[in-house]
Image (cartoon, rainbow, N blue to C red):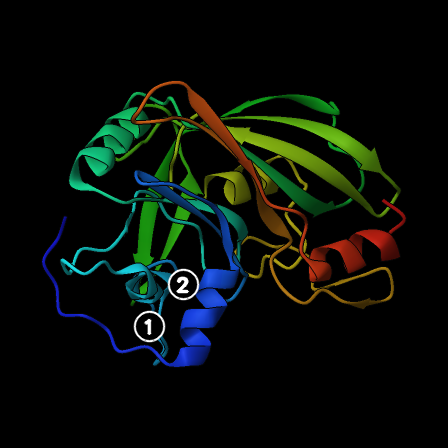
Amino acid sequence: MKTRAPVQLSNDEIAFVRSRVLYEDSQVLALDKPAGLSSQGGRIAAHTLDDLLWAFARSNGKRPELVHRLDRDTSGVILAGQTKPALSFLGKAIQGRRLKKTYLALVGGGAPEPRGGDIRLALRREEIGREAWMRPCPDDHPEALASHSRYRTLSASDEAALVELSPETGRMHQLRVHLAAIGRPILGDVRYGGALTAGGAAVPRLMLHAARLTFPHPEGGTRTIEAALPGDLTEVRSRLGL
């Protein structure tokens, strides 16, 4: 576990992060991250989810550590390790692509064509000032990173669709770029061309949710953790008749 100075949290912050627990045992902690909360290293003067994990600090000064990240405006399941061996185990599981992640997204433009399949697209990182994007590129580009996602359409209208997504690789912004590349950007995705209005009203944020995570447990077997759709995404989905 990393050695770092404790972060002082208010009683409200402690109560808030504890209310987001989906699963907890001696080895792992799973939380339902709300949209708008940075996983780590946020650029605004506010505590990140990583900071809030001090609410779970033990008497020996150790605390859980995140094993992966979600974009600031993505909601849903995020996993932390409670011990150094658990962190090492889960880190190797990620490297071995043994974590199975399932996302739900609302996309513009109706159902993708075809309605389900695989997206394989080389990506490269591009930085402009302090911001970073992922851009599609040829496979033989010197900075190319292979990426692969699976998708299927759950429901659709002429205006939008509800899509289930399973990333097979873990590139930054992968799902967002993949959907934009097939002409179905995620609603509310300012960076990659998503519509900011849908169903006659504003889209409040990036309509992407980490709905389910299946992972090998350090003590054996697997666990599957699910996070219900949050209210803002449910409201837009309902408005669109999806």
Element type at mark 2: loop
Residue drawn at x 45%, y 64% as measured from the top left: 17
Quarter of the image holding residue 197? bottom right
Residue drawn at x 78%, y 44% as measured from the top left: 109
Q: Can see residue 142?
A: no
Q: What is the C-alpha distance between the residues marked 1 and 2? A: 9 Å
Is 136 positioned to the left or the right of 154 in the image?
A: left
Of residues 191 and 14, which is closer to you in this image?
14
Q: Which mark is residue 173?
A: none
Q: Mark 2 points at which residue?
A: 38
> Is there a contact, CB below 8 Å, between mark 1 and mark 2?
yes
| Outermost front residue | 59
Provide residue 148's location: percent of width, then percent of height: 47, 25
Quarter of the image holding residue 202? bottom right
Element type at mark 1: loop
Tell which circle, 1 or 2, labels the residue nearer the N-terminal end: 2
Q: How many labels does the image show?
A: 2
| Outermost left residue | 3
Q: What residue type is labelled 2?
A: Ser
Provide residue 84's location: percent of width, then percent of height: 16, 40
Q: Mark 1 points at which residue?
A: 43
Quadrant for the C terminus in the image: top right
Query: Compared to 67, does 151 lie above or below?
Result: above
